[in-house]
Image (cartoon, helix red, strand yellow):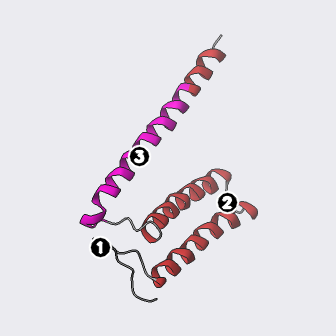
Amino acid sequence: MANAHTTAAGSSHGSYKSYVIGFVLSVILTAIPFGLVMHPVLPKDMTLLIVLALAVIQVVVHLVYFLHLDRSSEQRWNVIAFIFSAIIIAFLVGLSLWIMFSIHHFMMAK
């Protein structure tokens, strides 16, 4: 069970060790924001930034350790598809927020 599982194309599906590392990192990256929110010792703005930063790091941990996305040639198209999807979602959310704030600004100007 310590050996990595491989497919016919030769891409790795991870090993027991990599899953444990990913799980431990995920637990740590969840416990830190939980502790910061439950026991507020920092200003709210700083806490929000730390929680958001750790959330992004946790997404990367999940992509690497559980979805096995890396920079290998076998994963290149999967990484490109993920980046494209992330850009589209960022545009969709960002532009929606921009429209809502603009509407709010112009409606409150009267």
Please tell me in which quadrant of the rendered image residue 11 appears.
bottom left
Q: Nearer the viewer, mark 2 or mark 3?
A: 3
Q: Residues within 10 Å of mark 2 (few under 14, many from 20)?
A: few
> Which residue is labeled 3 in the image?
85
Residue denoted by label 1: 8
Left or right: 88, with 93 as reference point: left
Query: Can you give x and y, in whole percent of width and height, for residue 7 in the image?
Result: 34, 74
Kindly report the distance in space between the C-alpha atoms of the residues bearing marks 1 and 3. Answer: 27 Å
Distance from Cα at disc 2 to Cα at disc 3: 34 Å
Residue located at (40% from left, 43% from top): 87
Q: Nearer the viewer, mark 1 or mark 3?
A: 1
- The location of residue 55, given as percent across then percent down, is 55, 59
Q: Main secondary structure of the magenta part?
A: helix
Of 56 and 73, nearer the camera is 73
The residue sitting at 48% across, 31% down in the picture is: 95
Instruction: Please state the horizontal and vertical placement of residue 30, each as a whole percent of the image.
Output: 62, 67
What is the number of the mark on residue 20?
none
* Disc 2 to disc 3: CB gap under 8 Å: no
* Quadrant that contains the C terminus: top right
Q: Is residue 75 magenta?
A: yes
Span highlighted in magenta in the image: 71-99
Residue flagged by tag 3: what amino acid is it? Ser
Q: What x and y, as percent, mark residue 66?
A: 47, 69
Disc 1: CA contacts within 10 A as few (<14), some (14-19) or many (>=20): few
Name the amino acid, label 2: Leu
Q: Is residue 91 magenta?
A: yes
The tag earlier along the polypeptide, 2 or 1, is: 1
58 and 13: which one is in front? 13
Residue visible at 39% across and 52% down in the picture? 82
Depth check, mark 2 against mark 1: the one in front is 1
From the image, tell me which residue sits under label 2: 42
